[in-house]
Image (spheres, rainbow, N blue to C red):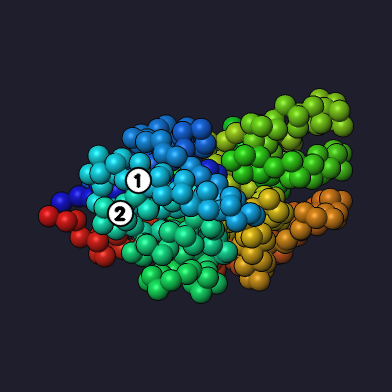
Amino acid sequence: MPHTILLAGGGTGGHVYPALAMGDALRARGHTVVYFGEASRLEGRVAPQRGYTFRAVEALAFPRAGLLAKVGFGLRLVRAALRTRAQVKAEGATLVLGVGGYVMAPTVLGAALLGVPSVIHEANATPGLANRLCARVASLVLVTFEESLGKIPGKVERVLVGCPVNPKVLVGDRAAAAARYGLHPEKPTLLIVGGSLGAATINEVARQAATAWRDDAGVQIVHITGPRYHAEVLASYRAALGELPAGLCVRDYEDRMGDAYAIADLVLCRAGSSTLSELCALGKPSVLIPSPNVTDNHQEANARGLERVGASLVFVEKGLDAAAAVGAMRALLADGDALARMANGARSLGRPDVAERVADLVEARFPVPK
């Protein structure tokens, strides 16, 4: 007998795409999966596109300061959990799979009020606030990084599984990708991507790289700007370069990341857990500029894990020397041996089968109530 599972959480690609990878694995085994999230955020757009029934739930941001604000938050969270409990019951849920983000908490807590078990997945090295809160009522916590195991509060069981990866990003053909992007299939290629929301700092480093390499026919760039920054980035490129030169492909969004990875010899990006898991599963060398605008600076902790095994170079955004980052990337693209060593380091952390492992755990640990 199949489960009715609620995927709960979201806000960014680092939460949404691992959730959908796990949801896809569970749906393939015959389970019913419904996505509970915030309609105005990424999950509200992407989950329905992927064929999921989507239910909008209330999201409450935790105040960082002020006792009265925190007390008020607690009262609002209780009310939100009580309202969401009715939604959980209406779906006939037998399990909740939470992936982090503020919007997860009302669903996990509402399910707990009904006695519905929950599994939480923590994608980052430093657990997020919603996961730390919900771990106290969860039945099982799954983590991506070993260092997270000791950072989960309470006595809940924790299992190291890694971060789920969409199998579609693992399949790509370099020659076909080169044709699609209008690039040469054999030239060293830098892929630049700022994540689902884009990243202004990444875009500025990209502009400097394209400007510095404008007369260098030996390298190519694929730059995925993010829709928010696309017009701004194009204007910046044209101000610096005139018309975009051959060897520079600029896209606002890429829904076929398998192509982008297939042509990439080196990747410049943020350090969200889902992106890093894709890099490791594929064995892609990277230059990482962790976002400082995240809870507990967790992206830098994520990035340092790859740095320790030689998979990545890490540049901190505060005081960033963009020219140094551009020079380091050019040197790497000219050094096949260095790229090969970095690729091996990335592969040492790769776990391409995480979504299937999570599905195995769910079925083994949580038999469907009769």
Decide: is 312 above or below 18.
below
Expressed as whole percent of the image width and height from the top left, the position of residue 108 reads 37, 52
Q: Residue sitting at 84 percent across and 42 percent down?
A: 208
Decide: is 221 above or below 64.
above
Expressed as whole percent of the image width and height from the top left, the position of residue 235 reads 79, 27
Q: In the rendered view, does 111 fall on the left or right side of 220?
A: left
Residue type at numbered disc 1: Leu
Q: Do tag 2 and tag 1 residues touch (Cβ < 8 Å)?
A: yes
Residue 345's tag is none
Q: Which residue is mark 2?
A: 113
Report how far apart the C-alphas of labels 2 and 1 lie in the structure: 8 Å
Classed neighbour count for the residue bearing mark 2: other residues with Cα under 10 Å, few (<14), some (14–19), many (≥20): some
Of mark 2 and mark 1, the one earlier in the sequence is 1
Expressed as whole percent of the image width and height from the top left, the position of residue 30 reads 23, 46
Mark 2 residue element: helix
Instruction: Say if residue 330 shows up in the picture.
Output: yes
Q: Residue sitting at 52 percent across and 36 percent down?
A: 41
